[in-house]
Image (cartoon, helix red, strand yellow):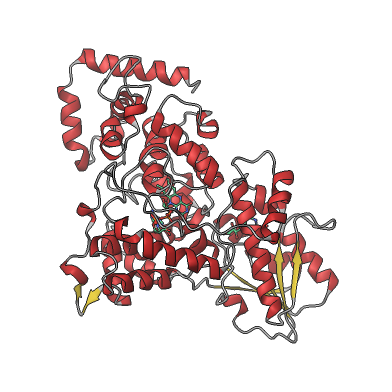
Amino acid sequence: MATLRLILGDQLSESIASLRDLDAAEDTVLMVEVDAEATYVKHHKKKIAYLFSAMRHFAAELEARQIKVRYTRVDDADNAGSLEAEIARALEAERYDRLVVVEPGEHRLKKTMEGWEHRLGLKTEIRRDDRFICTLERFDAWADGRKRLTMEYFYRELRKETGILMDGKEPAGGQWNFDPENRQRLPNDVAIPQRLRIEPDSVTREVLDTVAERYAGHFGDLDDFWFAVTADDAEAQLDWFIEKALCNFGDYQDAMREGEAFLFHSVLSLYMNAGLLDPLKVCKTAEAAYQDGKAPINAVEGFIRQILGWREYVRGIYWRFMPEYRKRNFLEAKRALPDFYWTGETKMACLRDAVLTTKKHAYAHHIQRLMITGNFALIAGLDPDAVNEWYMVVYADAYEWVEAPNTHGMALFADGGVMATKPYAASGSYINKMSDHCKGCSYAVSKKNGPKACPFNYLYWNFLIENEERLRGNHRLAMIYKTLERMDDEKKVAIRADSQRFLKELGI
Ligand code: FAD
Ligand code: DLZ
């Protein structure tokens, strides 16, 4: 049976289910670079370059194994522009008995895919994506009937089921979670390791030229491209992380330092999300580093929890609650996204650093995403649709299955508390505690009101005032609402006035 096997840009795994029963004599693998996928949100230039180059390398690896590949480049003259139109073109060129594909990571494409059999007139088999540690059925079985979907309990079950970081029935190191140890400020004298750079080869250089020309209007810088674009180089990045950064990952996981984009983070999400690295293998490699005494338990457990816990959990949440999930706007937030999210032109040092890092690298680490850009969006009451779109555009690792629960749920509380028990709202003092941004900022973190005060300080209280009706019943906010209750009216008026002035100056 001649089978056409479509591989999407984030399905670059040798073990992908759509290749499993491939008959090299009969079958063709289809890979297509299309404007529709590059522009449904205007992805960061570096993300497009990374994926197109990784796709070209993956296709070449398949061809080296004598597998027939039909590959359309984005600038091919007869490129039909979308996945569906490119499949149709492949069907005009050759006869196939069926199309085999693995389900995508985004709801919008899943809906389109489900119509292919009918619209293309070809038997279409959509296979499960089994590159995750937990199946969606397993997640639902865990979630069914629970009042709260607390990540920690899901994570503990996966620890037991996989045996990762387990001493028999007990957690390695005697505790499930070492988070309380992982919130240290980064001392000035701790040096940050130099990243492993993969220099662009001729394939990547050609892609960079195409992207520079074709997607010139997209956000982000293209120069200084050092991402891996093959599974071997992604593995080299994993090895680098284990050797040079993992040991400090735990202690400084929540820290920020001006001008330092990566600190001790792994920068592996873009590889796992596109299929160049297997998440289970990443967890096991980190576990082996603990067993070999190369990294302490708080670092290794903290790192593994992000992947075995959070990564698997957010995928389960996404598919359980979509499409209704993204329509929620629990806080009825509606302000427009300020221009500085694109330009970095703001006097707030922490936001400027997070946006400029993002523009340069298509990367920011978790605390910058959650507690700087995300926290500002939350307390300024920005429209969730605009904020979600921004996060989808700007990061090389962004796919809706992982972006939406993190942004819509964790950062914005727009899901009303599926992901988080309370909003991750914080004032300037949190940022000052975890970073060195405030000392060089035009605003004073010590000032609570007035034009010189850190905007996070008054916006934080303004957020609680604006959302009092919706949030007062949240028992985790009881103390903070008690403090608000005790606040004198004059102070509240100043908070409201400062917030209104500041948001007006931003034009939102
Ligand atoms: P590390 O800090 O080294 O962590 C190790 C790995 O754990 C990551 O590579 C990632 O695979 C996983 N991980 C860590 N935190 C999370 C999390 N909260 N959810 C899922 N996986 C996690 N991650 C994405 O992969 N794509 C996104 O589009 C994305 N959008 C986000 C939006 C917001 C508002 C927030 C707060 C977080 C978002 N994250 C997203 C999660 C997290 O910030 C990134 O995975 C992480 O910063 C990637 O950098 P790293 O590889 O250096 O991670
Ligand atoms: C993100 C992306 C981009 C920029 N370009 C392509 C492409 O040209 N061809 C392709 O097959 N996939 C691309 N992707 C990845 C898809 O958007 C991704 O598979 C879906 O969003 C589902 O996760």
Q: Name the residue at 34% across, 49% down.
A: 191
Q: Quadrant of ligand 1?
A: bottom left
Percent x, y for residue 109?
61, 58
Q: Name the residue at 31% across, 37% down.
A: 425
In the image, is 251 to the left or to the right of 267? Answer: left
Is residue 76 visible in this depiction of the protein? yes
In the image, is 249 to the left or to the right of 106? Answer: left
Percent x, y for residue 85?
76, 60
Camera-side residue of 349 and 418: 349
**Quarter residue 294 falls in:** bottom left
In the image, is 309 to the left or to the right of 487? Answer: right
Percent x, y for residue 445?
29, 25
Measured along the vertical axis of the image, is residue 285 above or below residue 263? below
Percent x, y for residue 472?
24, 34
Is residue 332 visible in this depiction of the protein? no
Q: Name the residue at 70% across, 49% down.
A: 211
Image quarter (top left, top right, bottom left or bottom right) of the N terminus: bottom right
Measured along the vertical axis of the image, is residue 129 above or below residue 497? below
In the image, is 464 to the left or to the right of 326? Answer: left
Q: Residue furthest top?
A: 490
